Image (cartoon, grey):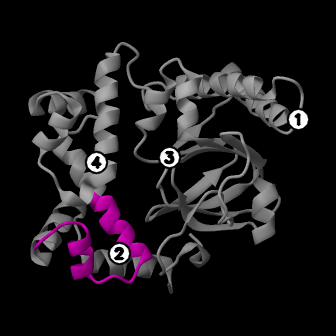
Amino acid sequence: MANKLATKTAVPVYQLYGEDQQWLTPDQVHCESIASRSRLHNWEIKPHRHHGLFQVLWLEDGSALLQLDDRRGQLDAGQMLLLPQHCVHGFQFSPAAKGQVITLAYPLFERLGGGISHLLTSFSGPRILELAASSEKHLIISLLAAVAQEYHGNAAHRRVLVESLLTALLVCVLRHSAGNLAGNADEPVRARQHLVQFGELIEADFTSQHPLQYYAQKIGISSAHLNAVCRQLAQRSALDLIHERITLEARRNLVYTSMTVQAISNALGFSDPAYFTRFFKRQTGLSPKAFRLCALSFGGDR
């Protein structure tokens, strides 16, 4: 990954990249080409994150060096990236890269119906989809084009049609990723709702390090039931999911800030930095200091 994608300061939170104003459009969706924003920044979108926004990025042509939290890789033509809120992401696109970025406000999901809301709000991390040649791929590309055309138009009932097209697009995307994103269609809706609630509760207050019983009581189920739901739908225990979120925040702080290990430990609710170090090493295989040195070595001067 190019050194340009690295940063030492705290990661900014934007409504849209490069904008610090509130989202002024009455729509709860924003649609633009990759080029329209990235070429203004020499095809580089530095690491940042969004609150309350979900993004779908379709790369039609070209390539992009990609940073997702502390991981680096490449996005190639024909791939689609799904980005939930709070995920740190940055791109270095090849010149004249072509594609589309659709940004959705989370409240919009509730209006789309069909169980889509629960599937999308449960995303805890980014997903890359390979749209192999198929009739489904052609349909997805057609829907992307239709969304863009209608979004930039001003015909009657524009909002209704945009949201209808988005519903169709997201259904096709979830179908395309069946088994990886959407899970088993026969899974009980209530179990998925419980998992979504659990994820929202973790996100809201993970630094308090509440016991599992706290989350179960908030949801209205037993700790054993919550653990069973997590193992069934996420293939991990409930405690694993809590620890993963704490570890993710620790990694972000180590990579993107100059906070000391003790400061990070305190911020994440650990009373003893030594215990935090043991926890982090158990989760990642590296001590916090070793992890930071490895990240600095990989990313160059920060």
The image's mark for residue 84 is 3
Q: Residues within 10 Å of mark 2 (few under 14, many from 20)?
A: many
Q: Residue at x 72, y 52 (%)?
A: 24
Decide whether residue 269 is among the magenta residues. Answer: yes
Q: Which of the two residues, 113 or 257, is positioned nearer the viewer here?
A: 113
- How far apart marks 2 and 3 lie (CA) works out to 21 Å
Is any part of residue 60 visible from this angle?
no
Reading the chain from its start, which is encountered first: label 3 or label 4? 3
> What kind of residue is marked 2?
Leu
According to the picture, the residue beneath numbered tag 4 turns out to be 202
Q: Is residue 239 above or below residue 187?
A: below
The spot of residue 242 in percent (x, y) is: 23, 49
Above or below, 76 against 184 in this view is below
In the visual, does 288 lie left or right of 81?
left
Residue that mark 2 sits on: 254
Mark nearer the viewer, 4 or 2: 4
Q: Disc 1 marks which residue?
A: 153
Q: Residue at x 35, y 34 (%)?
A: 196
Q: Is residue 1 or residue 118 the one in the foreground?
A: 118
Q: CA distance from mark 1 to mark 4?
A: 40 Å
**The furthest residue to the bottom:** 301
Check disc 1 and report its element: helix, strand or loop. Answer: loop
Q: CA distance from mark 4 to mark 2?
A: 20 Å
